[in-house]
Each structure stands twice: as structure tokens, then as C-alpha cells.
């Protein structure tokens, strides 16, 4: 936080969708309150060789992790055969992705593979 020439607090902006402290420039510093994310969504599921999907209504993905022993194909808001699909190899994870998603689509390339996802809104 910083003060301007008149001793008032200067508002700090968020960076990349990360939570920040909202500061009203004209308030007393004793009234500052955190302005983080209000809700979260999580998915812990098993992907099979048949495409499936789960509701995952978030604006920022904290992580998406492949806990299985084989590859999993994922896509956000579209089938795993559509443009934008990607593969997470065994043990791989993605994190800190500022992306709005409503549905997570997934399909294992073989067998049954477990994965986890966490995001915030």
C-alpha cells in the first residue's frame, strides 16, 4: 500500500486475476477488508476411455492434476475431440490459470485414470 501526497491510501489493483486487498481511497485504514474469491469448485474423478464431463464453474483454475498411471485428455467447455483439447501425462499438473470455465471434459487414453481439479470464482 502507498499513500498519496495528501496522506490518503492509494488503491492497489489485482494482478492476473489473483485476489487483492480492495482499498477505498477515502476510508480509514482500520476499515480495510480483504476482497478475495467467494466460492470454489473442485472435481475429483476417474476418467475412462469414454468421454465424460463435470460441472466446473470457475474463473481461475488453481490446479488440474493427473494422479493416474496413464494419459488423460482434457478440454474446457468443449469435447475432448474439439480444438483446444490437451493431454496431461502421468503425474503432470497445471496450475494458476486465469481462465473462465463452466464444464471440464475429460477422457483417459487407456484404462481408468484419476485426476483432481480446483478452481475459484
Image (tube, grey):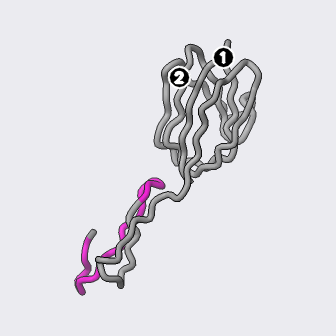
Image point (59%, 15%), residue name: 70
- Residue 83 image offset from top left, x and y in percent: 71, 34
Give the side of residue 75 with respect to residue 67, left or right: right
- Residue 15 image offset from top left, x and y in percent: 42, 57
Prevailing secondary structure of the magenta residues: loop
Q: Nearer the viewer, residue 25 or 32?
A: 32
- Residue 53 image offset from top left, x and y in percent: 72, 34
Residue 92 included in the magenta stretch of the image: no
Q: Secondary structure at mark 1?
A: loop
Tag 1 residue: 112
Give the side of residue 19 with respect to residue 6, left or right: right
Image point (60%, 18%), residue name: 71
Image point (58%, 52%), residue name: 59
Of labels 2 and 1, earlier in sequence is 2
The magenta span reads 2-19
Quarter of the image for the N terminus: give it: bottom left
- Residue 75 image offset from top left, x and y in percent: 66, 34
Give the side of residue 6 with respect to residue 109, left or right: left
Q: Is residue 35 above or below residue 108?
A: below
Q: Nearer the viewer, residue 109 or 81?
A: 109
Q: Is residue 18 above or below residue 89?
A: below
Q: Secondary structure at mark 2?
A: loop
Residue 3 included in the magenta stretch of the image: yes
Amino acid at each position: 500500500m502507498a499513500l498519496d501526497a495528501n496522506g490518503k491510501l492509494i488503491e492497489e489493483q489485482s494482478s492476473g486475476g489473483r485476489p487483492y486487498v480492495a482499498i477505498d481511497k477515502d476510508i480509514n485504514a482500520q476499515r480495510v477488508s480483504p476482497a478475495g474469491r467467494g466460492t470454489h469448485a473442485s472435481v475429483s474423478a476417474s476418467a475412462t476411455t469414454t468421454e465424460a464431463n463435470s460441472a466446473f464453474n470457475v474463473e481461475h483454475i488453481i490446479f488440474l492434476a493427473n494422479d493416474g498411471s496413464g494419459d488423460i485428455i482434457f478440454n474446457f467447455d468443449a469435447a475432448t475431440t474439439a480444438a483446444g483439447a490437451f493431454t496431461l501425462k502421468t503425474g503432470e499438473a497445471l496450475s494458476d490459470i486465469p481462465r473462465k470455465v463452466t464444464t471440464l471434459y475429460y477422457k483417459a487414453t487407456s484404462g481408468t485414470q484419476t485426476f483432481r481439479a480446483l478452481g475459484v470464482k
